[in-house]
């Protein structure tokens, strides 16, 4: 997140981890019925706000933030990515092999406010909050597709000859993914 102090967040995290059980709510938990990882949006928003600069700088930092644009951010998709990552680490399986987030990270103040707005109707969020993931999206990528998803265009010579042009040809339908 932009505009958030990592040292302040780290200090708050250590304080939260040191709290006695039952005294403080946790950011993350497991749903006892489904086993899905869950995020408490109010606690996460409070945590993020603890790392924001003083109020005057915070108000100036959110001016002109571009919500949902190609160069801006998408708070819902960013939140989905957090839940996706948590789910992947806790369950040991990737819930959606096709998930991607290709925008800027939101500013901490904007993201915290979006979390609080969503918490009004959905205070605890899990991967199940979004549309069910199709079986196709759950299948692992083929090795060359995984390499294409991770490598920059300058690494095209490492790929099989049959797919190199997808990375190198400016007229390729996926050329915009490889602008360096």
Image: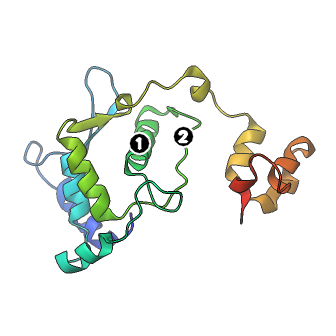
Tally the numbered discs: 2
Estimate how packed mark 2 is, as few (under 14), some (14 to 19) or many (20 or more) residues with alpha carbons within 10 Å: few
Q: Earlier in the sequence, mark 1 or mark 2?
A: 1
Q: Is residue 85 placed above or below 36 in the rendered structure? A: below
Q: Which mark is residue 7?
A: none
Circle 2 is placed at which residue position?
99
Q: Residue furthest left?
A: 23
Q: Is residue 153 left or right of residue 106?
A: right
| Residues at marks 1 and 2 touching, judged by CB atoms closer than 8 Å | yes
Between 77 and 33, the one lying in front of the other is: 77
Element class at badge 1: helix
Residue occupying the point 64% across, 31% down: 140
Residue 62, given in percent of the width and then of the height, sits at 31, 69
Q: Is residue 54 placed above or below 110 in the rendered structure? A: below
Quadrant of image for the C terminus: bottom right
Residue occupying the point 40% across, 57% down: 67
Q: Is residue 109 left or right of residue 86?
A: left
Circle 1 is placed at which residue position?
80
Q: Is residue 33 placed above or below 130 in the rendered structure? A: above
Q: Is residue 112 left or right of residue 139?
A: left
Q: Is residue 22 placed above or below 36 in the rendered structure? A: below
């Amino acid at each position: 997140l932009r505009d958030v102090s990592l040292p302040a967040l780290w200090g708050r995290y250590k304080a939260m981890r040191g709290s006695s059980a039952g005294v403080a709510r946790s950011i993350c938990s497991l749903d006892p019925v489904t086993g899905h990882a869950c995020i408490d949006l109010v606690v996460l928003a409070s945590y993020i706000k603890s790392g924001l600069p003083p109020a005057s700088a915070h108000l100036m930092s959110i001016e002109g933030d571009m919500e949902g644009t190609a160069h801006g951010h998408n708070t819902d998709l960013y939140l989905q990515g957090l839940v996706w990552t948590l789910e992947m680490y806790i369950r040991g399986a990737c819930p959606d092999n096709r998930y991607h987030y290709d925008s800027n990270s939101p500013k901490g103040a904007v993201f915290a406010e979006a979390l609080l707005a969503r918490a009004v109707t959905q205070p605890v969020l899990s991967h199940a909050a979004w549309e069910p993931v199709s079986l196709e999206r759950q299948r692992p990528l083929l090795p060359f597709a995984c390499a294409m998803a991770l490598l920059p265009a300058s690494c095209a010579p490492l790929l099989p000859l049959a797919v190199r042009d997808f990375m190198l040809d400016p007229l390729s339908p996926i050329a915009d993914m490889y602008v360096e």
